[in-house]
Amino acid sequence: MLKDFADYLTFNLFRLTPGSRSGEALDFFIYDTIKIFLLLVTIIFVVAVIRASFPPERTKRILSHRREYLGNGLAALLGIVTPFCSCSAVPLFIGFVESGVPLGVTFSFLISSPMVNEVALIMLWGLFGWRIALIYIGTGLLVAIIAGIAIGRLKMERYVQDYVWEMQVGNGEIGNQTFREKLVYARTYTGELLRKIWPYVVIGVGIGGFIHGYAPADFLLQYAGRTNPLAVPLAVLIGVPLYANAAGVIPIVHALMEKGMAVGTVLAFMMAVTALSFPEAVILKNVLKTRLLVTFFAIVAAAIVMVGYLFNAIL
């Protein structure tokens, strides 16, 4: 039904020629934009209702009183319901460190939050189907857990800036809300989040539509196809300097896959863009000393590269 509506707007209302580059690009843009926003509104609202029962102070206490490895898994799962970009996750990361959550656990959250969340799940499911969505979510959680455990076992607490340990964070707790209050919160939260991310969605889908209609398939296959053994690390290197959230990068990923780029290479690119970025490094430099910052980026990048190669081998 949505596809028919997009086709009508593109080829009847705007009178573009079916099969033309401009027609295919606009049709892609209209269809994916409508589909993504419908999914976002529905799922974000439901997740917000659930999140209203888990205020930040409560989650910090839960993570602080668990064994470290279990904490890594819980922190990574927490990232699913906290749709932060890599930069906006840093303040909560600082709060976790200050409250006594083990360092490796905090990094599991810092990795998972921008890379694995309901926005990513919704958009991946809508564009690629449930199989790719679950594969991405599962491996994203695995990267967050393994990388967090690795950093935790290195015992690098001394490379956190001293002032972080001295910060005082309030112990206030949001009171219990009625179900009606949770619905009001969810409606407000959904509206606020959509206002923040809609430009990224539109821009991302627009870029994806341009790639879908105009990018030469031969170029992408030549440099990022399965026959190029360095395609995965190259995709990660390209992704790290970029800065986008899942809403902005997934439509681009969709277009790249349709042009023939290998699945593992595309997912590695997406993970690098969402979980690692130069702006994030700049912010974290005020929290972490250089050795820990470099270690964090190196471990996560290596894990993403391995995931990319794994998917290229099995898919």
Image: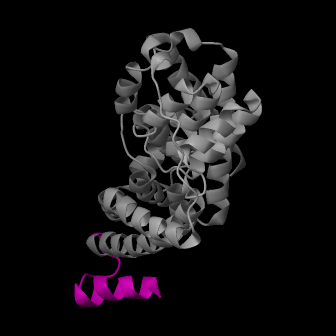
Magenta region includes residue 18:
yes
**Image coords of residue 179 (percent x, y):** 58, 71
How far across and down, in percent of the image, does residue 93 sit? 50, 32
The answer to which image quadrant residue 97 occupies is top right
Q: Please give the name of the residue rendered at 62% of the width and 28% of the height, measured from the top-left corner.
A: 101
- How are the residues colored? one colour
Q: Is residue 302 left or right of residue 256?
A: right
Establish if 199 lies above or below 35: above
Residue 269 percent location from the top left of the image: 49, 42
Q: Residue furthest left?
A: 14
**x, y (%) of residue 51?**
57, 57
Q: Residue at x 54, y 45 (%)?
A: 173
132 vs 145: above or below: below
Answer with left or right where residue 69 lies relative to residue 236. right
Question: Predominant secondary structure in magenta?
Answer: helix
Residue at (48% x, 36% y) in the render: 92
Identify whether 209 is placed above or below 101.
below
Residue bounds of the magenta highlight: 1-21
